[in-house]
Image (cartoon, grey):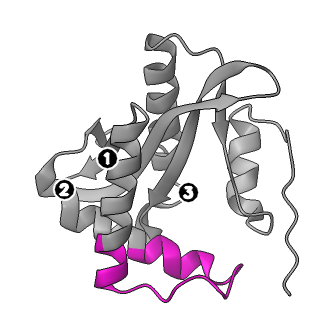
Amino acid sequence: MLHQDVIIREFAPSDAEGVIGLIIELQSYERQFIPDYAVPDRAFGQWYLERLRAELREHQGVLIVAVLEDKLCGFCAGLDDESAEEQSRYFYIAELAVSEAMRGRGVGTRLIAAMEELARERGYRTVVIGVLAQNTRVKGLYHRLGFRDYAVRLRKKL
């Protein structure tokens, strides 16, 4: 069920607390797949947002938010990146988070569509997004939206 009332817009400083809350929620969710992820608290969320915003500034990135009835329910961040092997640049969707209450309602789809439109406007021909290997729900969404497996990173704990 797609929420037509959800507004997608660029991040404003007044959105910081809402984004921090979503970062904490996302980190908590992803810890089921990667237990070594940092324990999320407000300090972590604030640090992560500051780090993300610095990376976006450095790489001509953008941070957008999804709002429903004046409440932040999602965010997405994208930036310029490159493939040395292909000698080309692409638009990388570095972060996507949707509140648990709004998952499965089309918010993530709308955020990705907005990022793809921004990428087109900037002249990119390729969009890349990452997903944790065990997160089959999100991977299924990305596949439904036309993303295909490209590379796999393997990890070994020592």
Which residue position is annotated with label 3? Answer: 104
Q: Do the residues labelled 2 and 1 touch (CB within 8 Å)?
A: yes
Q: In this view, does 46 lie above or below 90?
A: below
Front: mark 3 or 1? 1
Q: What element carries label 3?
A: loop
Which residue position is annotated with label 1? Answer: 65
What range is drawn magenta here? Answer: 24-46
The structure residue drawn at horizontal position 26% and vertical position 49%, both measured from the top left corner, is 67
Q: Can residue 109 be seen in this view?
A: yes
Q: What residue type is labelled 3?
A: Gly
- Quarter occupied by residue 82: top right
Badge 2 or badge 1: first in the primary sequence: 2
Q: Which amino acid does label 2 sit on?
A: Asp
Q: Do the residues labelled 3 and 1 touch (CB within 8 Å)?
A: no
The structure residue drawn at horizontal position 40% and vertical position 35%, both measured from the top left corner, is 61
Q: Are marks 2 and 3 in contact (CB under 8 Å)?
A: no
Which residue is at the front of the view, 135 or 144?
135
Which residue position is annotated with label 2? Answer: 15
Front: mark 2 or 3? 2
Q: Is residue 157 above or below residue 72?
A: below
- Quarter occupied by residue 73: bottom left
